[in-house]
Amino acid sequence: AWSDARNVTFKGGAFKRTAGQAQVFDAPTVTPYFVMAHKTATKRYWVHAGLEKVFVDDGTARTEITPASLFTGAIDDRWTGGTLNGIMGLTNGKDKPVYWDNNTANNLATLPGWDANELCAVLVPFKNYWVALDITKSTVRYPYMMKWSSAAVPGSVPTSWDETDVTLEAGESDIGETGDLLVDARPMGDALIIYKQNSRVAVRQTFDARIFSFQRLPGAGGALARGCVVETPLGHMVFGNGDIYVHNGGEPQSICDDVTRDFIFASLDTANGGRSFVVANTAKNEVWFCYPETGETSCTLAAVYNYKGKTWTFRDLPNVTD
């Protein structure tokens, strides 16, 4: 029995010292606030975005793909994005969402058909659509709104976001049954799970004129911030408001005992808690819930959960930003 475990890991009923860090790429050109793996037909890139610039790195060459106009987001304007039909899309909530055509000779460009007067806080691929959450139209914010694009032709990006064009599948809908705001979204099988601050909604394709259906999932449980949900063999593991839990589309199940939960949320810096994020270390059957400790502005501690052994340990982080 252990009352505390820091910078060690449990395996096979024993424990050992946690491995250290090693440099993989050359030092980044900018402080990265978003990192994502992106595969093309011929290469695997690591995408990293700073506040103003975005780069892709294939391990041999690093290329800047920033548009002519620099991005304008701040540290708390969290990047989101993903890959749809082999095409990467990104948004920071402060500038128009962009995509990259996988050609290092070309920079990021605004998503085709996107309204020049609109912004979105979250961008995520689902089926053959881009889905955008928390929409701003001409400076007016609609924090419950979900928009989706027209369906994409394989290998290309959707061409329209016009919800008024009845000949296309693009549309929008408010998810406002509960008063908590939209935070993030992540696919789960055939559904897209939308995370609000304290609740969850499952979105499914209907293959009719509605395009999508919406179902509120049982139980309380949302997401602390964007980037706080990760997929595992057991389901989505989520860094929530006041708890850490797993679910498969049903009731959320806490994976913390009382002592662990109390320690995490007592040591979490409330002013900068939105900079927390979650990452899966699948090779070791671990999920890292990374957060800034009290008085810190970037992530200095990871609560590490081994989902096979069902054990918790803690690991010091060197001021990690993503």
Image (spheres, rainbow, N blue to C red):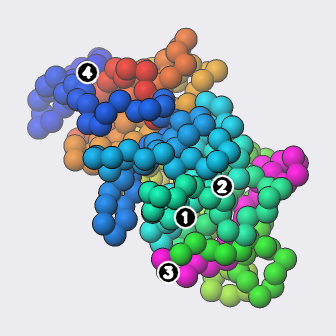
- Indicate the quadrant where residue 206 lies: bottom right
Between residue 204 and residue 164, name the one nearer to us.
164
Label 2, label 1: how far apart the Cα atoms are: 13 Å
Label 3, label 4: how far apart the Cα atoms are: 45 Å
Span shown in magenta: 135-155
Left or right of 309: which side holds 150?
right
Label 1, label 3: how far apart the Cα atoms are: 13 Å
Q: Which sits earlier in the primary sequence, circle 2 or circle 4?
A: 4
Dot in front, 1 or 3: 3
| Residue designated by label 4 | 7
Q: What residue type is disc 4 on?
A: Asn
Q: Which sits earlier in the primary sequence, circle 2 or circle 1?
A: 2
Where does the image place residue 292, in percent across and percent down from the top left?
A: 50, 22
Left or right of 255: which side holds 223?
right
Q: What residue type is disc 3 on?
A: Pro
Say what secondary structure mark 1 lies in.
strand
Q: Which sits earlier in the primary sequence, circle 1 or circle 4?
A: 4
Where does the image place residue 209, in percent across and percent down from the top left?
A: 73, 86
Name the disc covering residue 97, or none.
2
| Residue designated by label 1 | 125
In contact (CB < 8 Å): disc 2 and disc 4: no
Say what secondary structure mark 2 lies in.
loop
Residue 181 belongs to magenta span: no
| Residue designated by label 3 | 154
Q: Which sits earlier in the primary sequence, circle 1 or circle 3?
A: 1
291 versus 136 height, above or below: above
> Within 10 angstroms of label 1, few (less than 14), some, or many (20 or more) residues?
many
Dot in front, 3 or 4: 3
Between residue 168 and residue 279, name the one nearer to us.
168
> Within 10 angstroms of label 3, few (less than 14), some, or many (20 or more) residues?
few
Name the disc covering residue 15, or none.
none
